[in-house]
Amino acid sequence: MTDQKVFFGSNLKFLRERRKLSQEELANTLKIKRSKLAAIESGQTKTPPFEDVINLSAYFKISIDSLLRIDLGKLGSLKLRELEAGNDVYIKGGQIRVLAITVDQHNKENLEYVPVKAKAGYQSGFNDPDFIATLPKFSLPNLPDGKTYRMFPIAGDSMLPFPDASELICTYIENWNSLKPQTLCVAILKGTQDFVFKQVSLTSGGLLMESYNSLYKPYTVPVSEVLELWQYYSHHTRQIPEIQDIHSLTAIIKEMQADIKVIKDKA
């Protein structure tokens, strides 16, 4: 078994300097001696007291696992901001990105439905098992195994041809770094902001939100303002498509095929 390299001392120095703090300032904030802090940073103290490790983790809002096991100095600035915002995959307990779920009598995950009246409550109780247990829940056949599903209602015309009042079945995205550009997602936002259904892309400035409807301008939401991302899987609507819409779509496709044929003939 190979020895696991520990980055605690170098990470501590990196985070302190990132915040432009002197050893004296950080030591005073944490109520420890500067010499103790210096010894930890330099690696002279191989096994710092658990209390100090916990306090430093809480101060920088980065999990102990990440402080110990990941060389933070080699991470990109976006990932660092995501960690500092609480989006740390190693954080356990009642922290951000820890998904609360419910299961049926066969220990299979339910598909929970978040009705309009539960939106405000969901934003504050999304990681609370007791709150999630109060949501309506059901199961659907033929959903792929190994994923967590939830259903969200949408409103408005910003994502036409998805009609107003559609209900979206979505899968939970745990690793936002795996997000492909313009992925259809329901984003759960902090504070008084609503759920949004958009094409979502990860950028250096945060999460870019784009609508299908060109009347709605794209905008960027800081990573720290997003609680959860759910990727579109399917949707349910009671609205019957208009026949003329289908005819128009068919005409457009035929026109495109004719244009392609002309281009090929000229080539």
Image (cartoon, grey):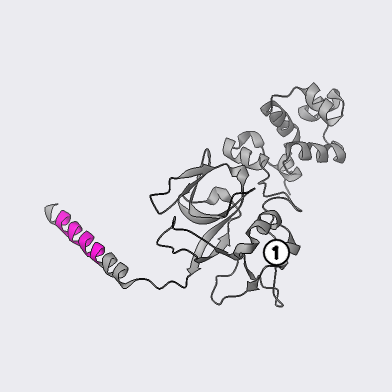
Q: Indicate whether residue 75 is drawn in magenta.
A: no
Nearer the observer, 33 or 158: 158
Q: Indicate whether residue 260 is drawn in magenta.
A: yes
Q: Which residue is mark 1?
A: 132
Q: Give the SS element for disc 1.
A: helix
Residue at 63% x, 59% y is 119
| Crowd around label 1: few <14 · some 14–19 · many ≥20 (10 Å) | many
Residue at 70% x, 64% y is 132
Residue at 14% x, 56% y is 262
Task: Give left or right: position of 131 versus 228.
Answer: right
Nearer the observer, 154 or 133: 154
Nearer the observer, 201 or 250: 250
Residue at 73% x, 40% y is 61
Task: Give left or right: position of 194 versus 255.
Answer: right
Range shown magenta = 251-264
The type of residue carrying mark 1 is Ile
Q: Residue furthest left?
A: 266
Total tally of numbered discs in the picture:
1
Helix, strand or loop for the magenta stretch, by majority: helix
Residue 212 is situated, as x and y percent measured from the top left of the image, at 41, 54
Residue 154 is situated, as x and y percent measured from the top left of the image, at 52, 61
Residue 141 shows up from this direction: yes
Residue 5 shows up from this direction: no
Residue 83 is situated, as x and y percent measured from the top left of the image, at 66, 42
**Residue 85, above or below 253:** above
Residue 215 is situated, as x and y percent measured from the top left of the image, at 39, 49
